[in-house]
């Protein structure tokens, strides 16, 4: 088991600022679809990138300001709908993305050595916005950290920000936000800032952390935006390969609604409700530790060969089934318990017609595979792979429309009581980010959660790194069974 690393406190040489679009942007409200506005998506997707060489902050700010002219919704703010207070919509008011600059005493090599196992101290690497609620947080928060050895002053102040909304001038009879100062300093709460000296021996490395509201983008959408930002940074005078499509109207519910599927991903089985609740409570009260395992292409091929020739499957299907089965074994679940595997399926090409090129909103639905624990753990890999494959292939235009209509009738949450959730970050282009000083040495989450992430392996397109947190008492067993195939 590789070691983790405790991140020291970060030093902020200046206050965070709001980076606003450099050009004119439309002043309007964007409808969020029922796929965007799911209760369980009201959080920010947090990415961490480690680069060997740093990029100039002013260069990153300038290119961010420019790309926000194209991706202007990310410079807006979420708000409650005037027609339905429970539903969110996006106010494209150009208030800006929050950009923080910091230093941290750690080297590239130190971080890279422990990068497989994030811990709670890693949350320091992303600036924490003090806000009353989720919708008060800017949809896009970015922090750039320069790595090295820093000698900080003994007396440090806690830096906080109060978000000051920019309002359009009442006298302006226009539906466009005019360009204004790109970098608007934020006011902070507390005493006047003291002058301080910081001794710095830099290693030249950089960490870039981003938090992007999941209500606005899915994984494919965030990758599209980040690639656009990197493109403008390195090639400022060229056009973007993909231009964003902002509309979500093609994902509106039908009238009247037509729920034509049972949707087990949102259904809690009444027959085992008590056992499922106990399992959920057990997992939540346990001390969780991250488990990370990397699978090379040859290892995944061995897992896939368990199903060949009778069943052809993708690498994701084979590995998802293997992780699901290993999870059930490690937790030693009751044999009669019905467990689920929930995973996202890209619906962009499932819909008829498909979503437009450049669509960066939430274009996925959850697929659900189900099995009794006894059958899952006692059968060979062929059984679980078949369940995953069937769940994935069941996603169709009608099923996606049915999910949208279901969410219109009730604000349902996925059944997480006895479920393993897998989120795929690989094969999205997230790991290919390059701001001009080389691709990232590491790409991953800011923290390990109870759900499972399939991460890209830098330098190995066909590899996967599996990362998730499990109860400490079961971590060793989970690692062990993951290696058996």
Image: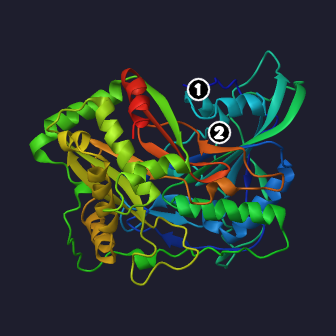
**Residue 259 seen from this side:** yes
Position above or below: 334 against 44: above
Residue 336 percent coordinates (x, y): 13, 38
Q: Nearer the viewer, mark 1 or mark 2?
A: 1
- Measured in 3D between alpha carbons, the distance from the residue under mark 1 to the one under mark 2, in whole angstroms, is 23 Å
Residue for badge 1 = 2
Q: Position of residue 72 (x, y in %)?
A: 65, 67
Residue 360 percent location from the top left of the image: 55, 68
Q: Is residue 32 above or below residue 275?
A: below
The quarter of the image holding the C terminus is: top left
86 versus 15 height, above or below: below
Q: Quadrant of residue 62?
A: bottom right
Q: Quadrant of residue 395?
A: bottom left
Query: Which residue is disc 2 drawn over?
Result: 126
First-in-chain label (1 vs 2): 1
Q: Nearer the viewer, residue 251 or 437?
A: 437
Q: Secondary structure at mark 1?
A: loop
Q: Residue furthest top?
A: 154
Most foreground residue, 348 or 131: 348
Q: Residue at x 43, y 79 (%)?
A: 250
Position of the N terminus by quadrant: top right
Secondary structure category for the residue under label 2: loop
The image shows a total of numbered marks equal to 2
Residue 431 point in image, percent of width and height? 65, 53
Q: Residue at x 21, y 48 (%)?
A: 371
Q: How is the image coloured?
A: rainbow
Relative to 134, 456 lies left or right: right
For the view shown, which residue lies furthest in the bottom direction? 353
């Amino acid at each position: 088991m590789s070691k983790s690393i405790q991140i020291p406190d970060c030093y902020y040489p200046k206050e965070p600022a709001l980076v606003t679009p450099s050009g004119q942007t439309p002043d309007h409200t964007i409808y969020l679809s029922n796929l965007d506005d799911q209760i369980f998506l009201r959080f920010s997707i947090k990415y961490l990138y480690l680069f060997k060489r740093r990029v100039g902050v002013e260069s990153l700010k300038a290119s961010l300001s420019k790309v926000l002219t194209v991706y202007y919704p990310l410079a807006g703010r979420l708000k409650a709908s005037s027609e339905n207070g429970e539903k969110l919509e996006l106010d494209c008011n150009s208030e800006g993305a929050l950009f923080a600059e910091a230093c941290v005493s750690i080297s590239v090599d130190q971080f890279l050595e422990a990068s497989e196992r994030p811990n709670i101290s890693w949350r320091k690497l992303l600036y924490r916005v003090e806000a009353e609620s989720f919708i008060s947080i800017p949809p896009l928060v970015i922090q750039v950290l320069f790595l090295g050895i820093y000698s900080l002053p003994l007396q440090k102040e806690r830096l906080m920000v109060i978000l000051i909304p920019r309002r359009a001038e009442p006298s302006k009879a226009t539906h466009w936000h005019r360009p204004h100062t790109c970098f608007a300093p934020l006011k902070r709460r507390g005493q006047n800032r003291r002058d301080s000296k910081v001794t710095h021996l830099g290693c030249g490395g950089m960490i870039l952390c981003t938090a992007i509201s999941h209500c606005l983008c899915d994984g494919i959408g965030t990758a599209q935006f980040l690639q656009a930002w990197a493109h403008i940074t390195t090639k400022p005078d060229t056009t973007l390969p993909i231009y964003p499509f902002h509309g979500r109207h093609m994902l509106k519910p039908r009238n009247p609604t037509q729920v034509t599927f049972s949707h087990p991903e949102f259904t809690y089985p009444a027959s085992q409700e008590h056992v499922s609740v106990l399992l959920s409570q057990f997992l939540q009260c346990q001390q969780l530790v991250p488990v990370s395992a990397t699978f090379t292409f040859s290892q995944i091929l061995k897992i896939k060969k368990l199903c060949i020739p009778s069943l052809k499957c993708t690498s994701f299907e084979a590995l998802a089934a293997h992780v699901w089965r290993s999870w059930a074994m490690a937790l030693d679940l009751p044999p009669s318990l019905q467990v689920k595997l929930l995973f996202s399926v890209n619906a962009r090409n499932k819909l008829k017609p498909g979503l437009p090129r450049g669509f960066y909103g939430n274009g996925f639905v959850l697929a659900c595979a189900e099995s009794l624990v006894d059958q899952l753990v006692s059968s060979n890999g062929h059984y679980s792979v078949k369940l995953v494959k069937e769940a994935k292939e069941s996603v169709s235009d009608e099923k996606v429309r049915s999910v949208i209509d279901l969410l219109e009738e009730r604000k349902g949450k996925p059944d997480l009581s006895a479920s393993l959730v897998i989120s795929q970050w690989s094969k999205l282009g997230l790991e290919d980010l390059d701001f001009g000083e080389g691709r990232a040495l590491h790409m991953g989450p800011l923290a390990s959660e109870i759900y499972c992430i399939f991460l890209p392996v830098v330098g190995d397109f066909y590899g996967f790194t599996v990362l998730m947190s499990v109860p400490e008492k079961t971590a060793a067993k989970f690692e062990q069974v993951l290696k058996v195939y």
